[in-house]
Amino acid sequence: MVSVKDIAARCNVSVATVSKALNGYSDISREKRDYINAVAKEMGYFPNSAAIALKTNRTYNIGILFLDAANNGLMNEHFARVLQGVKVEAESRGYDITFINHHIGARTMTYTEHCHYRGVDGVVIACIDFDEPEIIELVNSGIPVVTIDHVFHNITSVISDNVKGVRDLVLYAHSMGHHKIAFIHGDDSSVSRDRLASYYRTLDELNIKVPESYVLVCPYRDAEMAAKRTKQLLAEKERPTCILYPDDFTAVSGISVIEQEGLRIPEDISVIGYDGNSYARAMEPALTTLAQDSEVLGRCAAAHLVQMIEKPKTALVERVVVEGKVMVGRSVKKL
Amino acid sequence: MVSVKDIAARCNVSVATVSKALNGYSDISREKRDYINAVAKEMGYFPNSAAIALKTNRTYNIGILFLDAANNGLMNEHFARVLQGVKVEAESRGYDITFINHHIGARTMTYTEHCHYRGVDGVVIACIDFDEPEIIELVNSGIPVVTIDHVFHNITSVISDNVKGVRDLVLYAHSMGHHKIAFIHGDDSSVSRDRLASYYRTLDELNIKVPESYVLVCPYRDAEMAAKRTKQLLAEKERPTCILYPDDFTAVSGISVIEQEGLRIPEDISVIGYDGNSYARAMEPALTTLAQDSEVLGRCAAAHLVQMIEKPKTALVERVVVEGKVMVGRSVKKL
DNA sequence: CCCAAATGCTAAATCGTTTTCGAGTCTTAA
DNA sequence: TTAAGACTCGAAAACGATTTAGCATTTGGG
């Protein structure tokens, strides 16, 4: 590998001069700067990120915390998309991304320690149990952080508009003539709470009363539990005409048991998902769902993080909310 | 951040001694070693990876090349799983992973340059157009490399057993009484070629002849093209009784148009996917498909790469093949 | 024509480690 | 008693860059 020293030798100047030429400093003559840059290019020079990091304390690396209990954030298309979003945005701004975890090899470290070890310039946190003490530690560590789909005091966060999301979904179902709208919601998290509250509020607004038994909990992407919950709803004496699921995947699982019971979608019962997975669009009948703008979620997070890193003065803590939109399929029947 | 220098000061020894204690060298007394380690722990010492990288030329970072033309490798559940696999295996061996690309910020660099810039210890290449000249350059750069689902001369690779995969699928269909088995295969790549050859060979073995029109091409995960190809097959005067798709996603798209044509799965026509996506299992009817052991694919790749990195002497170039297995759903009818 | 300021460049320190080599001390055997 | 090993330990160089402070040289104003 060719280093600044090599270039300096070849150009008969000092390494300081080379460094300045390479970084476009002003106290260097135009000709010398151009000459050095030309030579550097010709010699195939590329900086050594470790040396730069050591000297400047900047790695141009951003950490990403991205694992749920089951450790399968990547299998979830929504989160895969947000990851994709932060990746492309970060890269376009000159940053690489590094996964942060707490068991690197034999030694275990906290998330914060891992961040310091790798010297990441900032971290985006998503798809994780935000109540872990380690997360709290990280958020308070002084490292620039932005969270996705969770808000901490004094930390900028970008969140999907879950309130508007289920509101739009409920309104859509209502506009299709549904009044008996059940809601299988995700397990405890701020996202789930927002959605649930919005469900209640919207129904209230519409002057619709639903029995308590219409509201059931089911972990995200838990096909088995979704099946069980669906059976419970089908057994209701006043059976709902429309079911909202926590996500598209559980919706598909629900559809599966509904059809196994000999009922048809949407003729006998309507179903609605959440997320806007590619499968939802491709299947028959196409699933009506709320398409989250997952990639934009990720891009916003990365963009704000870089802003905080590069212009800390100008960065105020913000709540960015990105809206999704209902994707009308054929899984909801007009009553 | 506390450095070895701080520890040295606190312990009244030299930094050299601290370094030796921390790294378990032998030329240091047992007591002093234990003492220094205790102090280090108490002071909350963590090494600085940049400094170590600079000095030792080892980053404990492995690069991962993971993008297709559409730049959406992550949306593909199969590849998400292999990524997950390399991630957990790498992490368990003490390595972080870094995405490699060629437009980092304003400056563009080749994959090889990016690898040198970040100083990754090795690279795993997957989900990419292996014919790109940049890939060839990287493979020949001297950086330890392992490829997934593609073999290069003199490079160790881990590949999914595509030959056995479609063979098992075809045999299964045959065992269910199918003779008119169509194959919509992926676009050009070594994976597609293996699968196609295996399809022909297995039919040959079974003494089954299929018309040329039964074999159609369709890019992976291209729902629209899959729909088009499906319609073509349905229009055949000698309509196939069973269709193999390039992947589960296109299979779902195919099912969709089949049902829109008023045909039933599997009563009127049987369909088979490839990959074993979670959706395939959850939907109704459950899709018969070949479940690739995607995570193991990734784990193997990472494991072999680390072996090459840490014990170059012992590392011979290998072809590791990992088998999948047919996952029987309800989408194939017994004739 | 002289002094001050601007310009162009370099030497050297520095970031946090690892590693070599030599030096000092202590055993042990002849 | 002494020479030769074993043990311990530390000084210093090195990795590849950035950055500060200062030295020359040139320029411009009065």
Image: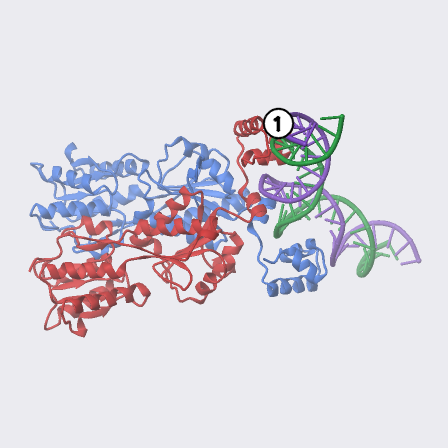
Chain colours: A blue, B red, C purple, D green
Residue A81 location in percent, x, y? Answer: 34, 51
Which amino acid does the dot numbered 1 rest on? Cys
Q: Is residue A36 above or below residue A56?
A: below
Q: Position of residue B151 (x, y in %)?
A: 37, 62
- Where on the picture, by quarter, is residue D9? top right
Where does the N terminus of chain A fall, quadrant-wise? bottom right
Count all numbered tags in the image, as a single digit: 1
Viewer-side residue, A200 vs B35: B35
Task: Provide residue A8's location: percent of width, then percent of height.
Answer: 68, 58
Instruction: List x then y, in percent, for residue B11.
Output: 62, 27
SS of the residue under disc 1: helix
Residue in view at x 38 percent, y 32 percent: A132
To which quarter of the image does residue B34 belong? top right
B107 is higher (above) or lower (below) than A163: below
Position above or below: B220 against A179: below
To which residue does mark 1 refer? Answer: B11
